[in-house]
Image (cartoon, coloured by chain):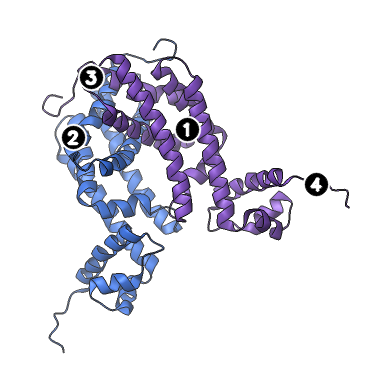
Chain colours: A blue, B purple
């Protein structure tokens, strides 16, 4: 027995993942080295492989944990953000932008690096995105239903959800270029642009190229 | 001399790229094989390497050509779509959705597969996206200027451009799930959501969680 505290497996894994997220965000998947991750985590390289199997296994563990955290923050805020659908949507979007602002490394890994590395990775990211899309579509549909408009349906809600989620994704780049802007400010701007527009459309205003 | 027509280098390259875009879209970069591309293009594998250097060189050639085409379609429509900024924006968005609908393989390669494969590839895609963002920001700023509102500036225009481009990107997934929807319909919905919302904000309506 050494004097070193025995760290439980789950805790050790979380420590390795914490470091790996930073290294993957900084270097990218291909350039990242397990040597560096092991060194920064203060354990041996064979130990990293023992816990997380391979560099891809490690990356997948990072992705899954960060995706779960992001989705949980989003859904939690949507569940508790208020009574009105628009308040819940606002709370959920704010939780998203706050997560990205506070966990920039996690977002870089999720957003920029998780594409075609493998089927398993693509599936993990697509699943998280689908969960968020479904949540947003549900809130938009609730907003439509509340407004009493019968012309719009779940296909429209799904359209708005895709637009909103895509806009939010893309606005994380704008946020990175404007570090002085708060997540609150970004969320308000987006709500103003999209929700106000949707409200107007619900009221019957229709834009058309024939009469701009 | 054989009876075979000598195909000029540029033309031959374009034929190889045509086939490669299909194969990359279908299989993904890693699973795609130069053997299959050569066979479908009706030339030898060494010839493919002679023309386009490597599998990555071939992929980069695909990306560059399709990105150039997409940006050219977008900018061409923006330049000729009308006098009012919103008509030009509408024409440009329509050109984008029509391109994606007509060149689904190109879009799969550009959108899904061009991420972290290499620095050169990431740079090519980021450049195309920046060109589109700048074009949209310019149109939005023109719209703001026309409205006579002095509170909004180029930072706001850049925000709206990021939201619009991100929304449009994401809506290509919605389009893939709704093959019955025309690019015209998708463009109109998006213009209604975003441009109408922006117009309302310009008129002074502000959404806030305090008074939804």
Determine the chain carrying the residue at label 1.
B
Would you name the residue on which mark 1 appears?
B178
Gap in angstroms between the C-alphas marked 3 and 1: 40 Å
Q: Nearer the viewer, mark 3 or mark 2?
A: 3
Residue visible at 46% across and 45% down in the picture: B125
Q: Which residue is mark 2?
A: A185
Question: Helix or strand or loop: what does disc 2 sit on?
Answer: helix
Q: Is residue B49 above or below residue A97?
A: below
Frontmost of labels 2 and 4 is: 4
Q: Is there one chain holding both mark 1 and mark 2?
A: no
Alpha carbon of mark 4 to alpha carbon of mark 1: how far? 44 Å
User: Is label 4 in a helix, a strand or a loop?
Assistant: loop
Q: Residue furthest bottom?
A: A1
Alpha-carbon distance for marks 2 and 4?
Answer: 61 Å
* Residue under numbered circle 4: B6
**Residue B184 in view of the camera:** no
> Label 3: few (<14), some or many (≥20) within 10 Å?
few
Q: Chain of mark 4?
A: B
x 15%, y 24%: residue:
B212
Q: How crowded is the residue under tag 2: few (<14 C-alpha within 10 Å), some, or many (20+)?
A: few
Q: Quadrant of residue B103?
A: top right
Q: How far from the left and from the top, in percent, is residue A171?
A: 30, 38
Residues at marks 3 and 1 on the same chain: yes
Image-based side of A80 in relation to B28, left or right: left
Total numbered labels placed on residues in the image: 4
Residue farthest along the left direction in this orientation: B210
Q: Which mark is residue B150?
A: 3
Q: Quadrant of residue B34?
A: bottom right
Report how far apart the C-alphas of labels 1 and 2 lie in the structure. Answer: 34 Å
Question: Which mark, residue B194?
Answer: none
Mark sitting earlier along the chain (4/1):
4
Res. A205 visible in picture: yes
């Amino acid at each position: 027995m050494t004097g070193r505290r025995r760290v439980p497996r789950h805790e050790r894994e979380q420590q390795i993942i914490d470091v790996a997220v930073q290294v993957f965000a900084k270097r990218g998947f291909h350039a990242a080295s397990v040597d560096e991750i092991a060194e920064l985590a203060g354990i041996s390289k064979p130990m990293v492989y023992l816990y997380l199997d391979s560099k891809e296994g490690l990356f997948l563990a990072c992705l899954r944990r960060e995706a779960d955290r992001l989705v949980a923050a989003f859904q939690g805020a949507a569940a508790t953000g208020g009574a009105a659908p628009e308040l819940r949507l606002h709370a959920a979007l704010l939780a998203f932008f706050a997560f990205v602002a506070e966990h920039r490394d996690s977002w870089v890994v999720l957003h920029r690096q998780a594409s075609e590395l493998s089927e398993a990775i693509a599936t993990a990211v697509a699943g998280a995105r689908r969960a968020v899309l479904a949540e947003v579509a549900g809130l938009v549909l609730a907003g439509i239903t509340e407004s009493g408009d019968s012309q719009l349906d779940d296909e429209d809600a799904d359209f708005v959800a895709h637009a909103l989620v895509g806009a939010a994704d893309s606005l994380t780049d704008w946020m990175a270029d404007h570090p002085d802007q708060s997540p609150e400010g970004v969320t308000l701007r987006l709500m103003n642009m999209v929700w106000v527009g949707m409200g107007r459309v619900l009221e019957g205003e229709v834009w058309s190229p024939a009469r701009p």
